[in-house]
Amino acid sequence: MLVYKRTAAISGGILVLVLYPGAPVAKPMQCSADAYATIKAQATKQDASVEVRCNLILSPGDIITKRLIFSGASASGATLDCKGATLDGTRGSINFGKPTVLIRSIKSQNGGWSAPSGIAVRNCVIKGALRLQGLGTNGQAKDVKASSLTANHTAFAQASAPSQISLSNLTFIADGRVPLYIGPGVTGVRLEKSTLTGESNGPALYLDAESAENTITKNRFAVTSRREQIAIDGSAKNVISGNIFDDPVNGGIFLYRNCGEGGTIRHQKPQHNTISGNTFKYRMAFTAKPAVWLSSRSGAQRYCFRDPAHPFGSSLSSQDFAQFNTVTGNRLIGGGAYLIRNSDPSNQIEDNSN
């Protein structure tokens, strides 16, 4: 099969996307016995992580303490099937505070980015966090900020980030960090049939600026947090459907755009998202924040307009612009449609009931 490779670079402030015929890409081989033994070995400060470029199949009783990292295009197509094994990055472990699983792009010496795609992670117990990372760890990272100063930032961020990542039948047990972080520009993630529990100092799931076209379906959200369960921060064209939210008293799904945080211009607006067929279960809904809040920040943050003056994105306006979204057929058990907050007539809000 002839595969066209994608590269992304900025030349004179202009995004250059080059598609050129590449060699047929072979499906990654199964990890060797030696690689498996290396991965299973206890993590130490000198040997805390391992790069995975093969199909890794674990045994149900395995407890992996090393960080598993998938870097660049060379990791594309790899599968991690835990078969019920535990990836342990809990408090007190060598890797506490770092992503337990990291799927990341890498920057080349010429300024281009090598991005992984087609990776599958399934049947894992993840004590810690899984992070997908393109230009940087978050919206304030150095390369994200530099790219944001150009008009074509969204396209460049997406071309430079992981794409088409499948996450299925996972159990996240958070311990401080956001258990699932979809970073700037990441596209095509599918999270399904998974459970997110534990305690987080942020949301259960964060969809960061310029990410898009991700599908979140048939999952259970039950993370203890002072924040909402799902943050859609300048992320667009996502589908969030058929999920269950256990007593999301501090918020269910919030759509907004972090205007100027860290000096980064946020370009993409949280628009054309579909939130449908989800179930929000409340014990005392009268004390709860909204189940769905479209434009939850409205330019009221202290860091708005800390980004440089440019005629685009959050530099031009600090408003959220959560428009053209669809919120339909959601059940709000123990509550009611009043738990959906909307201030823009372009959003479709229908058939949401208790």
Image (cartoon, rainbow, N blue to C red):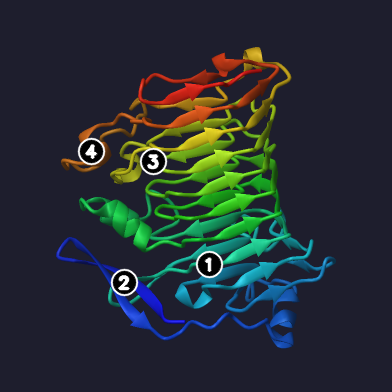
Q: Which residue is mark 3?
A: 234
Tell me which label, 3 or 1, sits earlier in the chain. 1
Q: Which residue is mark 2?
A: 112
Tell me which label, 4 or 1, sits earlier in the chain. 1
Tell me which label, 2 or 4, sits earlier in the chain. 2
Q: Return the x and y of residue 103 as percentages of the image width and height.
A: 53, 64
Mark 4: secondary structure = helix
What amino acid type should be assigned to the residue bearing mark 4? Answer: Ser
Neighbourhood count class around disc 1 (C-alpha, 10 Å): few under 14, some 14–19, many 20 upward:
some
Mark 4 and mark 1 in contact? Answer it, CB < 8 Å: no
The answer to whether residue 296 is seen in the rendering is no
What amino acid type should be assigned to the residue bearing mark 3? Answer: Gly
Q: Which residue is mark 4?
A: 315
Mark 3 and mark 1 in contact? Answer it, CB < 8 Å: no
Neighbourhood count class around disc 4 (C-alpha, 10 Å): few under 14, some 14–19, many 20 upward:
many
Q: Return the x and y of residue 318 as percentages of the image width and height.
A: 28, 31
Q: CA distance from mark 2 to mark 1?
A: 20 Å
Mark 3: secondary structure = loop
Which mark is in front, 2 or 1? 1
Q: CA distance from mark 2 to mark 4?
A: 26 Å
Question: Which residue: 39% across, 41% down?
Answer: 234
Image quadrant in which the C terminus is located: top right
Question: Which residue: 47% across, 61% down?
Answer: 163
Mark 2 and mark 3 in contact? Answer it, CB < 8 Å: no
Neighbourhood count class around disc 2 (C-alpha, 10 Å): few under 14, some 14–19, many 20 upward:
some
